[in-house]
Amino acid sequence: MPESFKPGDLVFAKMKGFPHWPARICKSENGHKKRVPVFFFGTHQIGHLPAENIVPYVGNKMKYGSGVRIKGFTEGMWEIQNTPGFSIGSVPPELQLLCF
């Protein structure tokens, strides 16, 4: 059974073709009932993923948080550790309501 997540939870989220990435759960929209919206640290993109592709940040940092050499990952790890609330100034207003 997939883990139950709530908006604001810090996680690692896995999209096809990418490693587990530092992210934060966003508020759910009606159009994605079977997917969980996440904000990706480092790239500042939003994705909608199946719950089974998401694991808690706490307890998985050592497993997924190092050794990745893809643009944005190191920045994402810094952000999730130092500014998990993230400044909303660089995010479009329509996304601020969903993810902040």
Image (cartoon, rainbow, N blue to C red):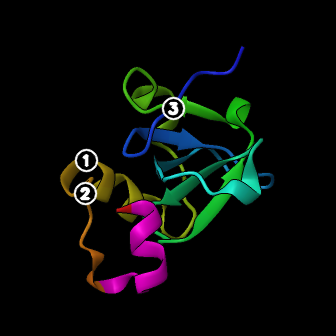
Tag 3 and tag 2, C-beta contact below 8 Å: no
Does 8 sit left or right of 54 as displayed? left
What is the CA distance from the residue labelled 1 to the residue labelled 2? 10 Å
Q: Nearer the viewer, mark 3 or mark 1?
A: 3
Quarter of the image where the C terminus is located: bottom left
Residue at image location 58% in from the left, 66% down from the top: 46
Residue 38: where, in percent of width, then height? 55, 54
Residue 9: where, in percent of width, then height? 39, 39
Under mark 3, the amino acid is: Phe
Q: Nearer the viewer, mark 1 or mark 2?
A: 2
Q: Which residue lies under the disc numbered 3?
A: 5
Under mark 1, the amino acid is: Gln
Does 13 sit left or right of 82 as displayed? right
Q: Which residue lies under the disc numbered 1?
A: 81
Q: Residue furthest top?
A: 1
From what the image shows, is residue 28 above or below residue 12?
below
Residue at image location 43% in from the left, 86% down from the top: 92
Residue 18 in sight here: no
* Numbered disc 3: secondary structure: loop
Residue 37 in sight here: yes
Magenta region: 90-99
Magenta stretch contains residue 91? yes
Q: Which residue lies under the disc numbered 2?
A: 85
User: Viewer-proximal residue, 62 or 56?
Assistant: 56
Residue 18: where, in percent of width, then height? 70, 54
Q: Residues within 10 Å of mark 2 (few under 14, many from 20)?
A: some
Tag 3 and tag 1, C-beta contact below 8 Å: no
